[in-house]
Amino acid sequence: MLYDIIIIGGGPAGLTAAIYARRAGKTVLVLEKDALGGQITWSPKVENYPAIPSISGLELGNLMAEQAMDQGAEVEIEEVVGIEDRGSVKRLRCAFGAEYEGKTVIIATGAKPRMLGLDREEELVGSGVGYCAVCDGAFFQGQPVAVNGGGNSALQDALLLSETCSRVYLIHRRDRFRGEEKLVEALRERENVEFVLNASVRELLGGDELSGIVVEQNGAQRSIAVSGLFVAIGHEPDNSAFADLITLDQSGYAEAGESCLTKTEGVFVAGDCRSKQVRQVATAAADGAVAALAACAWLDREA
Ligand code: NAP
């Protein structure tokens, strides 16, 4: 089948694009490599999305996915590894050999968690080192854990973990947090949360399982016994598979203005994978709407 619009990525940007495109009467396929909802599903609480005072990221992501599918968007769990531009038809190649064809493509691949780059970090993923407190926090009930980062993700992770873990060390490389003051205040009130500021994780301790970390703070080294380390130091894009069709900036984000247009006719980008200042659910959803309407206008012009 030749779809009008194939959307790569099932996060808020991709799902909003799907809703708008379906409401414009276009055939839509969403290709998502993991789970629908995207990064937001890792947020324990979202309290800044208009009209929804408080909701878990997982629930918000599920609601968006349901809405897109109720509108008639098709969904496949596939990782797109390349796009061949045949002019009026784009052929998408997936990791396990499947191929899909669309008249237009919206790239809404979001971003993946940034790693610390420490020795044995990859080896200890799932054995103490994690990037998603919502997904893995429950494994550390009653145990001491650390969270590294100073943005909203780290603050929210620390809050969530402080509800079930014996102690939470919040390690941040500066003495000021990038995340919201309201979250910092809430953490200050938790007796089992300790701020470890001006500090960086230097070493992961333990054998097959993490047993502690070495932290460098103000020039001195300190060992902290923890069973879990949640790394929440931001995200980076994963756009390399599309580098021949879109221009990437120095950090790998897709260069496209607010119009979401790329240098390739019929290829659009939306959400966190795009070069932009503010990466929020609201701005991702906004991009999804813009990209979908741009794709619809392009299809109507070419028809
Ligand atoms: P972020 O805001 O970019 O924060 C990343 C944090 O990690 C910063 O504090 C940064 O330190 C630190 N960091 C970066 N690289 C590091 C390194 N190599 N070593 C140690 N620390 C490092 O990322 P985020 O918290 O994932 O949030 C991303 C976006 O999503 C933000 O706009 C955030 O507001 C939003 N968000 C929203 C919600 C929500 O609405 N519910 C939830 C989570 C996130 P510096 O401060 O020193 O640069």
Image (cartoon, helix red, strand yellow):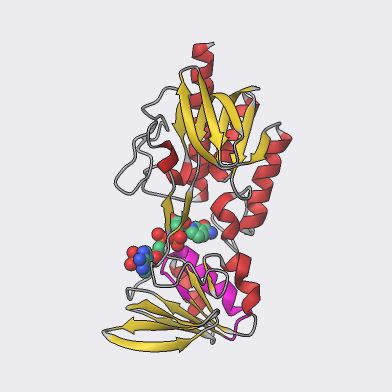
Residue 100 on image: x %, y %: 60, 29
Q: Nearer the viewer, residue 182 or 241?
A: 241
Asked whether, in this view, residue 176 is left or right of residue 289, the answer is left
Examine the structure image and report whether residue 160 is included in the region drawn in magenta: yes
Q: Position of residue 285 (x, y in %)?
A: 53, 42
Which residue occupies 57% across, 61% down?
A: 43
Q: Which span of residues is magenta-colored?
A: 147-166
Tell whether 219 sits left or right of 302. left
Horizontal and vertical percent for residue 276?
A: 37, 45
Q: Which quadrant holds residue 48?
A: bottom right
Residue beneath the point at 53% across and 70% down: 157
Question: Does residue 49 appear in this view?
Answer: no
Decide whether residue 222 is among the magenta residues: no
Nearest the viewer among 201 and 303 is: 201
Q: Residue 214 vs residue 185: left or right?
A: left
Q: Write the residue at 32% across / 83% down.
A: 217
